[in-house]
Image: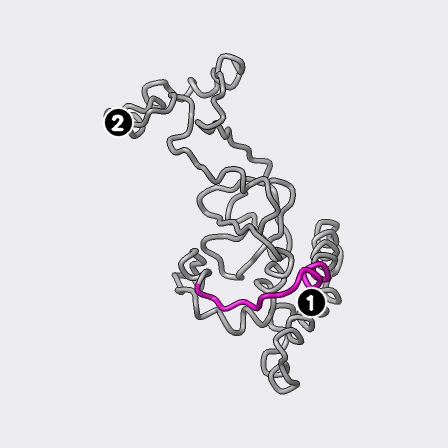
Amino acid sequence: MRGRDIKRYSHEFANLYIFTIFPSLKIDIELYPAVKQHLLSFGYDRLKQTGNKGARKKTTNQWFEIQDSISYWEDFYKQKIIYPEITKFLNFYYDERNFLVNNKCFIVTGTNIHFLTAFFNSSLFKYCFTESFPELMGGTRELRKIFIEKLPVLKVSLEVNLQFEKLINKIQTSKDQKELTIETELEIDNLIFNLYNLDDEEKSEIGFIEII
């Protein structure tokens, strides 16, 4: 998944794939002759990790492996939130399909992921925290970890997260099927408002800016 593929509660997978040959997997490349031949088509001198001019940086890894150990690679196979590094619309997508991402995306794993997906996509989040992210050219904003981790987020119970899980699954399924989701999005926004104990005046001030 690339940054441009991430939408609000949805995605547009472009059928792009990468070889994830992590050193920790200790893969024998000879068992995958088609992959070996494909990689060698780029030139062995470019792939070898010697630090020589025209080659990749020096490591102890095999020529066909990625340069870094990527100790967190298993996180890609957990339930997670994917969001773009640079975006105009602050899009967040809940993923349980084990998508990998390029360097233009970030992922969030952990507990209460469904609630966090709803919170990040909510009108409350956009109203309160848009200015927390540096504005770049073209009205886009940078959603790096250093900005995300500073945001105050309500800690909810597993029961509340389960409530959001049903809504997130419903809305993302509907978006996959190109169905209208306004009713569900309004329900999510209202739940967020109530969790933060907003009064009618505060709700009116915020409105449903992420939906309408």
Q: Residue at coordinates 28% horizontally, 27% vertically from top-left?
A: 58
Quadrant of residue 7 within the rendered picture: bottom right
Q: Residue at coordinates 58% horizontally, 72% vertically from top-left?
A: 124
Residue 18, horizontal then vertical, whole percent: 51, 32
Residue carrying label 2: 51
Q: Write the start and end of the magenta stretch as one range.
A: 150-164
**Of pointers 2 and 1, the one earlier in the residue sequence:** 2
Nearer to the camera, 11 or 107: 107
For the residues marked 2 and 1, what is the alpha-carbon distance in whole angstroms?
A: 51 Å
Residue sitting at the far left: 53
Give the crowd class for mark 1: few <14, some 14-19, many >=20 residues within 10 Å: many
Label 2 sits on a secondary structure element that is loop
Q: Is residue 126 above or below residue 112?
A: below
Q: Residue at coordinates 49% horizontally, 48% vertically from top-left?
A: 105
Residue carrying label 1: 188
Nearer to the camera, 199 or 41: 199
Callout 1 amino acid: Ile
**Image quarter of the N terminus:** top right
Residue 34, horizontal then vertical, whole percent: 53, 16
Callout 2 amino acid: Gly
Q: Residue at coordinates 73% horizontally, 51% vertically from top-left?
A: 173
The answer to whether residue 71 is left or right of residue 124 is left
